[in-house]
Image (spheres, rainbow, N blue to C red):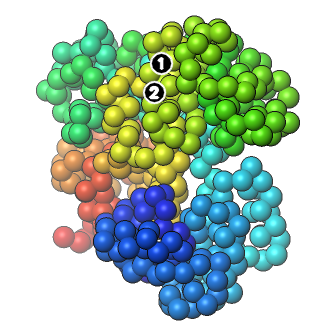
């Protein structure tokens, strides 16, 4: 597919790398000349120096040949202009826009009302707020992902050195009597990604992903040694960003006492004008004395949501030492996700990961229902519909030759039955199938899954 990307920032670069690896032809429009030189030396893409808000620049780039246009600059206004230009120059192209403003839904309605077709509006902050809220009451869980309308649950957790899981092989866990329809689908061990088998031994500091059903979710948490908090009463947030405001609004509605720490006085006034109940403190949320003065000890949730990864990592470590029960760090650089895990910061969120997921779903439209990437994009969970002609339909899983590094994590029948499968399970036409796979074999997996039974 020929894809034009507005913006060459770090988020756009992450998107571009993934799309290029999947065989797409990319053209990237970037205004900063030095950034253009960097992209030219690091990406197998055509880099055009120019403004994404200019008809002339896009015509010079050849936008008339675009099959997809992705507006992913750091400016919402320029992203809107990009989509308007794309709609005028190549109306048949698929269009995606990333917006950061709290008013993203108003922009979406306005564009639709004026006949501007946008195929996907991506608002990473909304996803981040949902992901944070889902895990706040579960201290030992890094993240929770939903598939098949929430009927399939996938959660991540660290195997601590003193956990009963450490040193056990997966077959031992099966004999220990886990809840029905539960399995460990992925293991991240340092930089290694593992699709495990029955003889795989869990090691301290492994980061594992467990698949279960909505019905068995709480029981599976308990089996793995994780207990939910009864209620969240207090939350500290460092950084007065739009993400901080959004999660604070959600927590306020739940009766949570929220304190937000922001060093910029003008931003403090902006935050305080929006939030109804939260306490906004003009101060350094990375200062231990400040946190102790505000009674950080034993706080139920501590969220490090500044724009700087280094600050978020340092503050999160400090919060753990001061007794925060749940710590969440916002990381803008995907490569810092592994570092956070090694430092014992269990829960991290990233805007870029969500943006990549949304773009991949759009690129694969008609084939894939949902895409979820994990850590440094080393692995994916992909949800597909099994068609009657697929060569994977009608045979026991143990008889199928899946690509190395891929496993079926869940099968959901059209009538609602959820199966976390073993080797005897059979995929039927119309099933939703959730695969877990190394990023390197996703293309082959999709190709094989979509191939008809008569193809080699």
> Is there any visible trace of residue 262 in the rendered image?
yes
Image quarter of the C terminus: bottom left
Left or right, 217 with respect to 81, comes to left
Residue at 54% over, 81% down? 50
Q: Residues within 10 Å of mark 2 (few under 14, many from 20)?
A: some
Image quarter of the N terminus: bottom left
Q: Are marks 2 and 1 in contact (CB under 8 Å)?
A: yes
Q: Residue 127 got which mark?
A: none
Q: Relative to 16, does residue 145 appear above or below in the rendering?
A: above
- Which of the 4 image quadrants contains residue 35? bottom left
Name the residue furthest left: 199
Q: CA distance from mark 2 to mark 1?
A: 6 Å
Q: Relative to 233, does residue 152 appear above or below in the rendering?
A: below
> Where residue 110 sits: x, y (%)?
81, 67
Left or right, 200 with respect to 129, comes to left
From the viewer's side, name the closer residue of 299 and 216. Answer: 299
Which element carries disc 1, helix, strand or loop?
Answer: helix
Residue at 74% over, 17% down? 257
From the viewer's side, name the closer residue of 145 and 287. Answer: 287
State the residue position of label 1: 318
State the residue position of label 2: 314
Q: Residues within 10 Å of mark 1 (few under 14, many from 20)?
A: some
Residue at 67% over, 32% down? 263
Which element carries disc 2, helix, strand or loop?
Answer: helix
């Amino acid at each position: 597919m020929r894809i034009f990307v507005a913006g060459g920032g770090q988020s756009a670069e992450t998107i571009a790398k993934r799309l290029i690896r999947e065989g797409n032809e990319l053209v990237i429009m970037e205004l900063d000349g030095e950034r253009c030189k960097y992209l030219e030396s690091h990406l197998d893409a055509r880099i055009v120096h120019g403004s994404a808000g200019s008809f002339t620049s896009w015509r010079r780039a050849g936008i008339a040949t675009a099959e997809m246009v992705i507006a992913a600059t750091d400016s919402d206004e320029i992203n809107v202009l990009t989509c308007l230009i794309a709609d005028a120059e190549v109306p048949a192209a698929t269009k995606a826009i990333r917006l950061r403003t709290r008013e993203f839904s108003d922009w979406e309605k306005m564009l639709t009302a004026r006949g501007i077709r946008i195929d996907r509006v991506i608002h990473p902050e909304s996803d981040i707020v949902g992901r944070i809220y889902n895990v706040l009451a579960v201290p030992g869980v890094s993240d929770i992902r939903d598939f098949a309308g929430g009927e399939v649950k996938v959660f991540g957790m660290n195997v601590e050195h003193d956990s009963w899981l450490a040193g056990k092989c997966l077959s031992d866990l099966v004999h220990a009597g886990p809840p029905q329809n539960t399995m460990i689908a992925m293991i991240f061990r340092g930089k290694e990604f593992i699709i495990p088998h029955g003889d795989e031994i869990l090691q301290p500091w492994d980061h594992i992903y467990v698949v279960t059903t909505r019905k068995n979710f709480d029981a599976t948490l308990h089996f793995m040694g994780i207990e939910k908090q009864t209620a969240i009463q207090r939350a500290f947030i460092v950084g007065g960003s739009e993400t901080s405001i959004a999660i604070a609004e959600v927590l306020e509605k739940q009766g949570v006492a929220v304190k937000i720490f922001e060093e910029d006085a003008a931003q403090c006034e902006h935050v305080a004008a929006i939030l109804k109940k939260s306490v906004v403190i003009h101060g350094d949320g990375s200062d231990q004395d400040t946190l102790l003065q505000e009674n950080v000890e034993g706080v139920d949730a501590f969220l490090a949501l500044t724009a700087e990864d280094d600050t978020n990592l340092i503050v999160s470590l400090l919060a753990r030492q001061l007794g925060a029960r749940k710590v969440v760090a916002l990381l803008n650089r995907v490569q810092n996700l592994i570092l956070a895990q090694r430092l014992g910061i269990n829960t991290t969120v990233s805007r870029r990961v969500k943006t990549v997921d949304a773009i991949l779903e759009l690129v694969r439209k008609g084939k894939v229902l949902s895409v979820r990437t994990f850590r440094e994009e080393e692995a994916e969970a992909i949800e597909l519909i099994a068609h009657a002609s697929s060569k994977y339909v009608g045979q026991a899983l143990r008889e199928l030759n899946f690509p190395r590094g891929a496993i079926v994590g869940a099968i959901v029948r059209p009538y609602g039955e959820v199966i976390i499968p073993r080797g005897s399970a059979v995929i039927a036409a119309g099933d939703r199938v959730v695969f877990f796979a190394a990023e390197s074999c996703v293309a082959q997996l999709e190709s094989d899954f979509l191939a008809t039974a008569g193809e080699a």
